[in-house]
Amino acid sequence: MPRPLDGVTVISLEQAVAAPFATRQLADLGARVIKIERPGGGDFARRYDESVHGQSSYFVWLNRSKESLTLDVKRPAGSAVLHDLLSRADVFVQNLAPGAAGRLGLDADRLRERYPDLIVCDISGFGADGPWAHRKAYDLLVQFETGLVSLTGTAEQVAKVGISIADIAAGMYAYSGILTALYTRATTGTAPAVQVSLFDALAEWMGQPAYYTRYGGRQPERVGAAHATIAPYGPYPAGDGTTVLLAIQHDREWRTFCEVVLGVPALADDPRFASNASRVAHRGDLDRIIAERLAALAGPAVRGLLDRAGIANSRLNTVEDFLAHPVLAERDRWRTVATPGGDVSALLPPAVVSGTEAYLGPVPDIGEHTDAVLAEIGRDPDQIAALRADGVV
């Protein structure tokens, strides 16, 4: 079955999370992704943990369907191999340390001059220019710098987001930027360059609290797992010790909630709770009333009332609960992917493109495709052996 990016070749000098996430999604759509790794250790994300058949959970998640080529691009022979690959490629992605691509002659301006049809995507920490262009950036650093961590946690204690949200945001924008550039090249004949930074990506996701703070005069409070600016919207304990999350989105739902769930219709018109702004201002009083009512009911009974009232709700799941979730199982969202350590389960990509099926290929071992890729670009067995003996691959 044809896939949207069949015939597109991506060369990626990638490491960690952001760039591998972008290129894995291109591979899901059928692109051929050749991942260049350091001879010896490869992508350092391979060693973040050993939880998946002795392999890193990060690496297994981010690198299916790719080919792995070990290559020392700082050596002249390695650089020659890289340029042979770039001359045949459609997209080049890199998230090297600040300034490294330029020192290697792999900056977008020089590459586009040499390969006019090549789409170059650079992923950086704080942007390719400006006062912080030289600074290293990792996910948690960017969570701190954008102010995100000041919004998460409790009133007493800040907390990081539990996933690599800055990396993921940057990877998503790199992915969509590359798709946009491919479309632009197809329609205009011009291959634009793409720049994405972790800081800019997460800064965009900070839009709502930024507006709230600039024009409201104060930033949203840290309220644990509750919503900072909508109430009631958060977790409440039921009488059986389980936790139920409920979400009121507007005053009509609030009125129904008071009638059906709380059994106190008049509460909807209490001046403390008559609007969302007043409910947020009197959150403590509101939470006490809700907690007292729900403490008399078991979790399933609470959710039954919420369903009857048309109020969105959820239980507090663990990761194990998520893995067994019926929405995934009953919609056939799991597939099997091979890895060097053994088969693993992998989720299909979120975007379902009608008439196509995502490609979920194996996770490569370090340098697994080195000889085949080198032979493809004209290196004979003796040359490949010499490159290997010299430590270039």
Image (cartoon, rainbow, N blue to C red):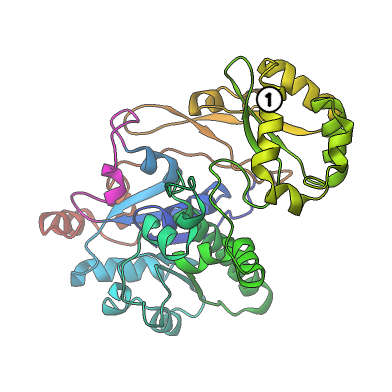
- Report if residue 28 is visible in the image: yes
Locate the C terminus by quadrant.
bottom left
Residue at image position (31%, 48%) is 45
Residue nearer the viewer, 72 or 22: 22
Residue at image position (44%, 58%) is 143
Which quadrant holds residue 111?
Answer: bottom left
**In magenta segment, residue 65:** no
The three-letter amino acid code for the residue at tag 1 is Glu
In this rendering, position of residue 192 left or right of residue 259: left
Residue at image position (39%, 67%) is 125
Residue nearer the viewer, 346 or 340: 346
**Residue tagged 1:** 292
Residue at image position (45%, 43%) is 162
Which quadrant holds residue 205?
Answer: bottom right
Q: Which residues are magenta?
A: 38-55
- Report if residue 371 is visible in the image: no
In terms of secondary structure, what is the magenta stretch mainly? loop
Residue nearer the viewer, 87 or 224: 224
Image coords of residue 126 (percent x, y): 41, 72
Q: How many numbered tags mark residues here?
A: 1
* Up/down of 67 relative to 362, above or below: below
**In magenta segment, residue 48:** yes
Image coords of residue 104 (percent x, y): 27, 76
Name the secondary structure under disc 1: helix
Image coords of residue 176 (percent x, y): 59, 62
